[in-house]
Amino acid sequence: MVRTVPIRVTAALATALALSLTLAGWPGDARAGRADAELRVTARIPVTLDLRVSDQAPAVTLTDADLAAGVKDVPSATVLEVRTNSDLGYVLELGLPDAPWLADVEVRAAGAAVRGQPGDLVHIAVPAAGTGTSLTPLDLRLRLAPGAAPGTYALPLALGLAPL
């Protein structure tokens, strides 16, 4: 990310800066009588991303009705708190659970949906919502494998972030 910020300096500092730039052989407007000057500074600010799990369902319970439907919807299965200084957004990386009772998993977040097989790594591009902290809920649609049985199962997700 590159930002240009104008900085106002005092007349004494401007005179000293203009004199030093002139002595260094820099071209430009270096007049000692000016009352102000503008200095342009360009800095590269590295993108920072911080991920915290705000809320997460520790497990999912499959019922006979879920097995008959072949799917289990888990709204807000995980809620992520993401802090970033990026004005472009980020990529959410999800390692899907490798479970024999799953056929595939659809993840919905930030208006996008991706689908993967158990054990896959999937990516969702999350557009910028401004810099600062935002909450991103992850909704899961679990398509159940033939032979899945009723019960309560752990629902581990591996999570990561990368800048866009």
Image (cartoon, helix red, strand yellow):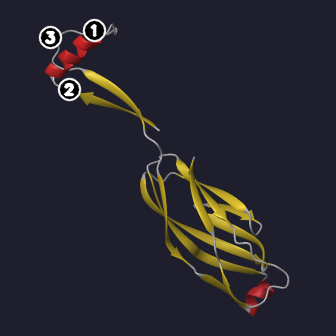
**Of the image marks 3 and 1, the number of the one nearer the N terminus:** 1
Is 27 left, or right, of 111 in this rendering? left
Q: Residue furthest right?
A: 146
* Mark sitting on residue 33: 3
The three-letter amino acid code for the residue at tag 2 is Val
Residue 100 visible in the current orientation: yes
Q: How far across and how far down the image is residue 4, in percent?
A: 38, 31
**Of the image marks 3 and 2, the number of the one nearer the N terminus:** 2
Q: How far across and how far down the image is residue 44, in percent?
A: 44, 35
* Mark sitting on residue 64: none
| Distance CA(mark 3)–CA(mark 1) | 14 Å
| Distance CA(mark 1)–CA(mark 2) | 17 Å
Q: How far across and how far down the image is residue 15, in percent?
A: 18, 15
Please tell me whether mark 1 sits on a helix, a strand or a loop. Answer: helix
What residue does disc 2 label? 9
Q: Nearer the viewer, residue 26 or 73?
A: 26
Q: How far across and how far down the image is residue 43, in percent?
A: 40, 33
